[in-house]
Amino acid sequence: MAAVRKPFRPLIQTLIGTGMRLGEAEQTRTCDVTFGEDGTELRVRRAKTLAGVRTVFVPGWVAS
């Protein structure tokens, strides 16, 4: 992470920690984030699944 410029670190951490594709991360909005007792989740729209939507678990080190 030291080689990544500071403004891009949250994006890179999100991609690595969640396994999201870059296009999915770019489309993510604040309203797609769900904070719950079991952890944080992101709702990915226009995903490459049959339903077109998928939920991605966000590890604690990424959510913080």
Image (cartoon, grey):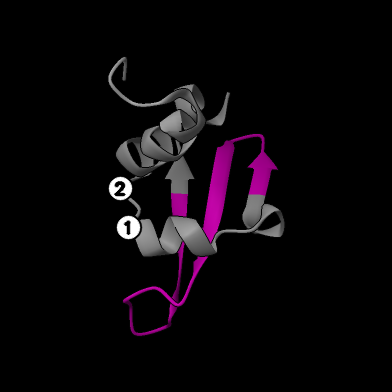
Task: Check disc 2 and give the amino acid type.
Answer: Gly
The quadrant holding residue 50 is: bottom left
Identify the residue at the far top of this view. Answer: 2
Q: Which mark is residue 19?
A: 2
Q: Residues within 10 Å of mark 2 (few under 14, many from 20)?
A: few
Secondary structure, mark 1, is loop
Q: Nearer the viewer, mark 1 or mark 2?
A: 1
The region drawn magenta spans 34-56
Identify the residue at the far right of this view. Answer: 31
- In this rendering, the answer to whether 53 lies above or below 30 is below
The quarter of the rendered structure image containing the N terminus is: top left
- In this rendering, the answer to whether 6 lies above or below 29 is above
Residue 3, magenta (yes or no): no
Q: Which residue is mark 1?
A: 21
- What main secondary structure does the magenta stretch of the protein show? strand
What percent of the width, then of the height, locates residue 12? 37, 37
Secondary structure, mark 2, is loop
Residue name at image x 39 percent, y 64 percent: 23
- In this rendering, the answer to whether 43 lies above or below 19 is below
